[in-house]
Image (cartoon, rainbow, N blue to C red):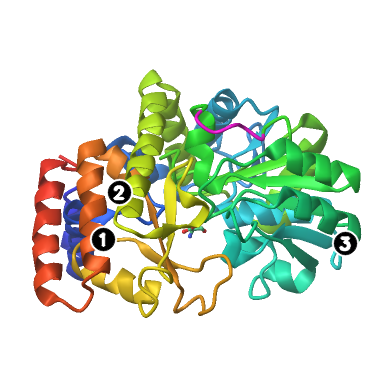
Amino acid sequence: MDNKHVREVDPAVADALAGERDRQEQTLAMIASENHVSEAVMEAQGSVLTNKYAEGYPGARYYAGCEYADEVEELAIERAKELWGAEHVNVQPHSGTQANQAVYYATLDPGDKILSLELSHGGHLSHGHPANFTGQMYEVEQYEVDPETGYIDYEGLRETAEEFEPDIVVSGYSAYPRTVDWEAIQAAADAVDAYHLADIAHITGLVAAGVHPSPVGVADFVTGSTHKTIRAGRGGIVMCDEQFADDVDKAVFPGGQGGPLMHNIAGKAVGFKEALEPEFEDYARRVVDNAEVLAETLRGHGLSLVSGGTDNHLVLADLRDSHPDLPGSDAEDALAAANVVLNGNTVPGETRSPFNPSGIRAGTAGLTTRGFDETAIEEVGDLIYRVVDNVDSDDVIYEVGERVVELCEEHPLYE
Ligand code: DSN
């Protein structure tokens, strides 16, 4: 991790890498999709496999010299099957979005219909947003969360499905703090003979550890990213039953991608091995417990939380009740200045815009990785509130920033 070779060749990049390492050490990574992978995962990602082209799949490549690439990809697949219990796994998607793209490509024709959760209600760009290819290539209808409870409106989803008759229903979210009822969504999809794609990008680790119910064996397709709560090498994954295996594999390669990023697949294999250790279940449970403490702390200070709290790794605060003149983006900036890195986020019933949203989203996966316990998380919640309530005070931002650095030094990331 001293990047000595980079420093010899390219001091400018070496400086940026050193800066990023210090930034991660001295700030709280609370963007809910981020985590800190192990040095073993990083070593695998920075390995010689970056040099290898391996189009195709293990045992059936288009190039010679793939024996070690095969070994690594087979290990990643076997471990993923063990973690999530899927019949078929493709570990080649370069990202969660490309995993979703593969499922759409395997199941839909241009003009077919997607039913998905609205972005400001917790959905994702790759679920049919107009700015994404999915919003341009397919016809999209959206379901919402209940405005009173903040929970998915399953009844509304079922009714919209009956009216819209989608070809695929998408579940799984990027800013939804509650447990998802996969069976209810599967029933809505079955009733209109639609496929069901469950995108568990955020909660892959929680599902693998059994602290969130699994959609594997319920939904037709399950996609995810591999670097969030599961803490493995960066990228995506598709899981499905054997009946869809060929379609999915062809949709990933050659349908949507070229050569697999074998170094990242090695990082996935290593991270999956770590996640199969008994300690990972304890980690995932602590992520959820910590999120609950964060929710309680913020709520205790009078912040409104979407759905009132959390069942998973994230909380979404709607600032409009407590701080009507404070956009989440301004809270994000003030918190970043105090070394707390999270993101402004749209909220259900958004009255501002994605660049100037009304909420903030915070996750506990990264802090839990570096050993923050419930007491430390409670203090972090207090510090977050102090900044949110004093965004114009340089003194408060300075004091909180100093305390955050102390907390980070008490919980070092990398030796
Ligand atoms: N960027 C991720 C998130 O923050 O949720 C999803 O792609």
The reply to whether the C-beta atoms of the residues labelled 2 and 1 are less than 8 Å apart is: yes
Q: Amino acid at mark 2?
A: Thr
What percent of the width, then of the height, locates residue 153?
A: 69, 52
Labels 2 and 1: the sequence-earlier one: 2
Residue 149 part of the magenta segment: no
Residue at figure coordinates x 35%, y 46% from the top left:
296
- Determine whether the residue tagged by mark 2 lies in a helix, strand or loop: helix
Labels 1 and 3: the sequence-earlier one: 3
Confirm whether residue 36 shows in the render.
no
Chain part drawn in magenta:
211-215
The prevailing secondary structure element of the residues shown in magenta is: loop
In the picture, the disc for residue 297 is: 2
Gap between marks 1 and 3 measured at Cα: 42 Å
> Which corner quadrant of the image does residue 47 belong to?
top left
Q: How many other residues sit within 10 Å of disc 1, few (<14), some (14-19) or many (≥20)?
A: many
In the picture, the disc for residue 86 is: none
Determine whether, in the image, residue 381 is placed left or right of residue 393: right
> Which corner quadrant of the image does residue 157 belong to?
bottom right
- Determine whether the residue tagged by mark 3 lies in a helix, strand or loop: helix
> Where 338 falls versus 313 (above or below)?
below
> Where 393 falls versus 211 (above or below)?
below
Confirm whether residue 77 shows in the render.
yes
Q: Which residue is mark 3?
A: 164
In the picture, the disc for residue 385 is: 1
- Determine whether the residue tagged by mark 1 lies in a helix, strand or loop: helix
Determine whether, in the image, residue 369 is placed left or right of residue 85: left
